[in-house]
Image (tube, rainbow, N blue to C red):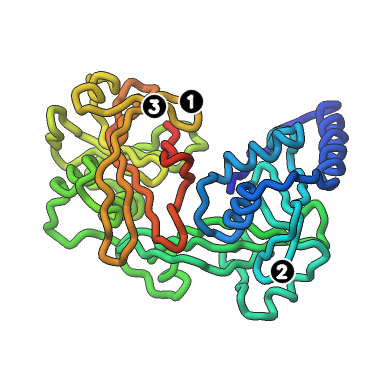
Amino acid sequence: MKFLHPMLLTGSTLLGSAVASAAASEAALAPVALPADARAMTAVTALVSCQPTAYTETALAAELLQRAGTRAEDLPGAAQRFRLPAAVTVLGTPTDLIAVGGDGIHAILADTPIGNLTGTGALKPHHYPQRQGRWLTPVAVRNDGDGWIRQRVIEVDVDPQRPGDLRVACTEVIDSRRQQQERAGDVAPMTYPAGTDVMPLVGNILECKADRRASVTLATSLLMNGPPSPPFATWGDESDAERFQWALPRPLPLRDVTVRSLRLVDSIAFGVVEDVPAAELARRWGLSSAENDFGEPVYLKDMPVRVAPDGWEEQRRLWILDEEDGATLVGCGYEERVSEFGWWPGDRMDGTLVAPRR
């Protein structure tokens, strides 16, 4: 699910925007009828129920909005409703309405009190304060060792455009053992055992030779426990709180380059390579050129799929990114799947993985 950043408006711009937003909201409530399209129908049902589908939420949302002659950015704070050619069943309730907007695709349960769903015990209140007023039911859970506990959940909340209706969507809740322990009053340190030389592990992680659990453990250990050695500095925009840089205890040889620090980007630990452009390093390492979802150049190479002991399959992809400050980043992105739920987390379209934004 995507979230839109608010725009700061003043004076007549604010008034004009409010009028336009109200008009857009009113128009968006009028459902647009969709033609009989079995593929889209199946995809909608799968997306809101956390089931596998060849569509990504982003791609399907864009396709549906195009049919209505609009875009997500044209609906600030609103969503376009669509009427399906036939009803689908969501959380045991039939509906033929969906809403598509900046925060994703939702099934709409019209004129449905939340008590109709919570009374069955299938939904639980969301435990995060910032998500109050939302209910969820987990459909898949994975524990990444000392890292994150991730749940794929069906989430329900009241439609802000029409409070008598409920919205249903599939999303991901990321938690950590530390956060769970804090709520339980039992906080334990998240560190590697004393005397552990993490340098070989770091090298394996950067080259996609380790599993996702090791990668997440490293990223979480950095984030929770501070840097292994100074200096520690934020990196990127002030609003980009997910990017940090740590110096390694000693230089790390990585194939034909040297890594002296790590950057944490979107919960992935990347090695910083200096004085070697990304294109040159990609040529030497045999990576293919591509673009991420934001049109930015990246270089990548798919590694063999690994089957973890718990039965989840892990797709590993080696990334090389060219950063704005001239540094080259090398790291490994992971996606996972279990047969019942498809690839998770992140979107897949025609067998490709979504690239991190640099």
Q: Earlier in the sequence, mark 1 or mark 2?
A: 2
What residue is at 58 percent from the left and 63 percent from the top? 154
The span from disc 1 to disc 3 (Cα, nearest Å) is 9 Å
Q: Earlier in the sequence, mark 1 or mark 3?
A: 3
Q: Quadrant of residue 256?
A: top left
Q: Amino acid at mark 3?
A: Ala
Disc number for residue 290? 3
On the question of residue 225 being in view, the answer is no
- Residue located 27% across and 34% down the image: 330
**Regarding mark 2 in the picture, which secondary structure is present there?**
strand
Identify which residue is drawn at 70% across, 74% down. 117
* Of marks 3 and 2, the one in the foreground: 2
Q: For mark 1, give the secondary structure.
A: loop
Mark 1 lies on residue: 295
Mark 3 closeness class: few <14, some 14–19, many ≥20 residues within 10 Å: few
Image coordinates for residue 159, horizontal then vertical, percent: 76, 56
Which label number is shown at residue 93? Answer: 2
When asked about the image quadrant of residue 206, the answer is top left
Gap in angstroms between the C-alphas marked 3 and 2: 42 Å
Disc 2 residue type (three-letter): Thr
Residues at badges 3 and 2 in contact (C-beta under 8 Å)?
no
Label 2: how many Cα within 10 Å (few below 14, some 14–19, many 20+): few
- From the viewer's perspective, is 13 left or right of 122? right
Image position, residue 181 (x, y; %): 41, 71
Across and down, in percent, residue 119 comes to 69, 80
